[in-house]
Image (cartoon, helix red, strand yellow):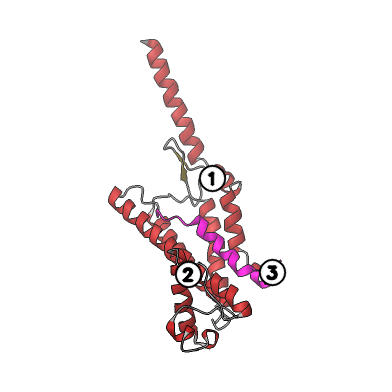
């Protein structure tokens, strides 16, 4: 009986020590399920959505206006997100939550996610516009690998979580098609030999490369969808 009481006391003491370690020196701690964190994650997602569609257009199409100041503002927001993330508590696999600011910062700054966040936040396109032939604007898109699509909805129902996963899937599918379209145009625009399969370009002789931006994007987007579906994988050229 005494042994059981001693064991319970030791367990309580250990739990108290863990709690004391977690709460010791907590300053500006952010709970992962708090409304502020959920709202902030949603705001980061909106910034990423805008950047993920705008940057490929700027890189591939010369006619697209550059939103330089907007992108710098987004990178400043990403930089602020690094601070928030380094102050946000996180859950262990056991379900326990880590609240100690030193342990949170150590865990985050030693993770690969911090490197991605840092590269996406630095305005490399200002100082190194093209490094080894790569447009450094695309570094902002590294933030896509860090999107918290769950929005910390751990307390929500499984239906909401499932719906969010479906939205996540459709977003990345659309983004893949958009990336493919912009990449395809950047390739065919080099020598300008490729001719789309649309009637207006192949039989009526209209110049695809002299068309307006909307026409070129819709046409190249349609072609990228065909390639995704396994069609038009070997298009003819006028060469």
**Badges 2 and 1: C-beta atoms under 8 Å apart?**
no
Label 3, label 1: how far apart the Cα atoms are: 38 Å
Few, some or many residues within 10 Å of mark 2 (<14, 14–19, 20+): some
Q: Quadrant of the N terminus?
A: top left
Tag 3 residue: 133
Tag 1 residue: 104
Secondary structure at badge 3 equals loop
Label 2, label 1: how far apart the Cα atoms are: 50 Å
* Residue 170 at x, y percent in the picture: 39, 61
* Residue 70 at x, y percent in the picture: 53, 75
Compare marks 2 and 1 and give the one earlier in the sequence. Answer: 1
Compare marks 3 and 1 and give the one earlier in the sequence. Answer: 1
Secondary structure at badge 2 equals loop
Q: Which residues are magenta?
A: 125-151
Compare marks 2 and 3 and give the one earlier in the sequence. Answer: 3
Residue 35, placed above or below residue 202: above
């Amino acid at each position: 009986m005494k042994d059981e009481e001693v064991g319970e006391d030791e367990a309580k003491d250990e739990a108290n020590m863990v709690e004391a370690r977690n709460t010791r020196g907590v300053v500006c701690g952010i709970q992962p399920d708090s409304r502020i964190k959920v709202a902030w994650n949603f705001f980061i997602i909106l910034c990423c959505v805008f950047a993920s569609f705008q940057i490929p257009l700027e890189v591939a199409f010369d006619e697209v206006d550059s939103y330089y100041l907007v992108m710098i503002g987004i990178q400043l927001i990403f930089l602020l997100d690094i601070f928030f993330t380094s102050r946000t508590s996180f859950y262990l696999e056991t379900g326990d939550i880590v609240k100690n600011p030193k342990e949170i910062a150590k865990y985050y700054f030693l993770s690969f996610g911090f490197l991605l966040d840092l590269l996406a936040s630095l305005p490399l396109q200002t100082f190194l516009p093209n490094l080894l032939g790569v447009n450094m604007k695309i570094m902002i898109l590294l933030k896509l690998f860090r999107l918290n699509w769950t929005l910390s909805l751990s307390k929500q129902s499984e239906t909401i979580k499932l719906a969010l996963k479906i939205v996540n899937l459709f977003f990345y599918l659309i983004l893949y098609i958009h990336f493919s379209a912009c990449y395809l145009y950047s390739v065919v625009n080099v020598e300008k030999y490729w001719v789309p399969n649309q009637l207006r370009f192949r039989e009526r002789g209209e110049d695809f490369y002299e068309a307006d931006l909307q026409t070129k994007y819709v046409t190249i987007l349609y072609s990228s969808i065909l390639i995704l579906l396994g069609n038009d994988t070997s298009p003819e050229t006028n060469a």
